[in-house]
Amino acid sequence: MPTTEENKYAPTTWGGSTGEDLTVPSGQLCKVRRPGPTALINEGVLHSMDQLTAIVDAYVTEVEGKPKVNVDSLMKQPSKIIEMIHIVDKVVCATVIEPKVHMTPNDSTSRQNGVIYTDMIDIEDRFFIFQFVMGGSNDLKRFREESEELVGDVPAVAEDVHPSLRGHLRKRPASGVEL
């Protein structure tokens, strides 16, 4: 097959991505592909993108000209949080190439040693990957700046939230809770 120099029509972005390195907020390095929203919808990963948008929009208000999540209201709707996290987890599994990430099994006895499941990844890292894949690298700086402000209202320990969310939450020393 001719190289790009030999064939100016050689595919450079078509035919799949080999991925790119991404360092997430926890410091973990991973390789992700960025297929874009349309490809993720076609792959069946984002079949409920409208649903995700509706969930987020229902809890976002504008405060001093900036979007702000009403965390208190959202925390009273654990099914919405779980639904949102599930969609994000599906995108993470579909786009992280290395290390391979799998959906958390419903039955804890089905877990396998050495397998990375979505619930083993900090929620901030999962949302960061989601934002990178969906919004591109230009949005990452804004995401980092806004995420700390948004997470500031989250309860300090997992026991402060609805019991149905506890399986999705892990304590984070001195900085709140990770969903």
Image (tube, rainbow, N blue to C red):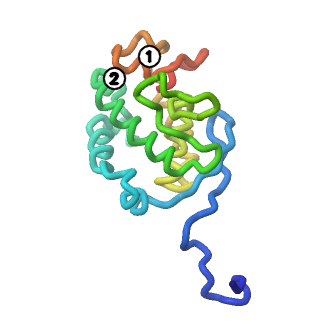
Q: Quadrant of the N terminus?
A: bottom right
Q: Earlier in the sequence, mark 2 or mark 1?
A: 2
The residue that appears at 52% across and 27% down in the rendered structure is 111
Please state which amino acid type lies under the numbered disc 2.
Answer: Met
- The reply to whether callout 2 and callout 1 are in contact (CB within 8 Å) is yes
Left or right, residue 132 beside residue 159: right
State whether residue 102 is above or below residue 37. Answer: above
The residue that appears at 64% across and 32% down in the rendered structure is 114
The residue that appears at 53% across and 51% down in the rendered structure is 95
Q: Which x, y percent locates residue 179?
A: 46, 26
Indicate the quadrant where residue 77 lies: top left
Q: Which mark is residue 20?
A: none
Left or right, residue 36 beside residue 67: right
Q: Which residue is mark 1?
A: 155
Q: Classify mark 2: helix, strand or loop.
A: helix
Please state which amino acid type lies under the numbered disc 1.
Answer: Pro
State whether residue 86 is above or below residue 1. Answer: above
User: In whole angstroms, how far apart are the C-alphas of marks 2 and 1?
Assistant: 9 Å
